[in-house]
Amino acid sequence: MKCVTLTSRQAIRASKSRTRRTRCDSQDVNVSGFETRRLPAEPVDMAPDGTDVRPLLQLKGGSFAHFELAPGKVSKAVAHRTVEEIWYFVGGKGDMWRQTGAQEQIVRVEAGVCLTIPLGTSFQFRSLGDVPLEMVVVTMPPWPGEGEAHPVKGKWEPKIT
């Protein structure tokens, strides 16, 4: 996500407030003060793993987004170069594979399950059933953009359209 900090004068004109703001890909991100946002009706982007992304909010220490993987689909396997994540599943059912060094695990995921993706962990997930697998994710520090995720050998053959 490319971000540009607006000058105080630009921010005041844009928001009619006196908080410093940052413009990121045509969305405002408040870097001081309060921000409120509703989940976008449609995905805004596609993540490197192939999931639909609806960015929500961002602060200096992290970003928060909603992700969705369609029924029957399998993500691409990736690992992150500089960020860690906490995932909380809000809908659907699926499996999550994670591997770091000799430690490897596959867990069943569904609404109410929370898990971590530590720095450098390889991971892949799949949506089982007839509804999308949905999750909200905290990324720390905020997602830096293209090149952060790199492909790795996964557990399953990816099925992304």
Image (tube, rainbow, N blue to C red):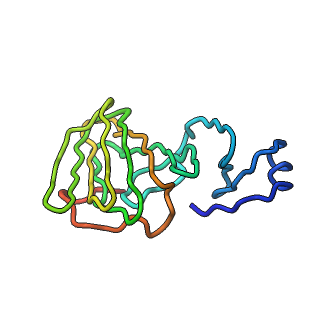
x then y, percent, for residue 133:
34, 40
> Which residue, as the protein is rendered here, is positioned at the far top?
112
Residue 101 image-quadrant placement: bottom left
- At a point 30% along the width and 34% down the height, the residue shown is 113
Q: Is residue 145 left or right of residue 38?
A: left
Q: Quadrant of the N terminus?
A: bottom right
In the figure, 25 relative to 66: above or below? Answer: below
Residue at 86% over, 55% down: 9
Name the side, left or right, on which 3 lies relative to 152. Answer: right
Decide which of 17, 106 is in the foreground and name it: 17
Answer left or right for 142 relative to 159: right
Tell me which corner region of the image, top left, top right, bottom left or bottom right, holds residue 132.
top left
Query: Tag count in the figure?
Result: 0
- Residue 151, by quadrant, is bottom left
Please state which of residues 41 and 18 is positioned toward the viewer in this rendering.
18
Q: Residue at x 38, y 66 (%)?
A: 81
Quarter placement of the C terminus: bottom left
Q: Position of residue 18 (x, y in %)?
A: 81, 44
Give x and y (percent) for residue 160.
33, 56
* Residue visible at 40% across and 52% down in the picture: 51
Residue that protrudes farthest toward the left in the picture = 102
Front residue (pair 87, 156):
87
Question: Which x, y percent locates residue 154?
Answer: 21, 61
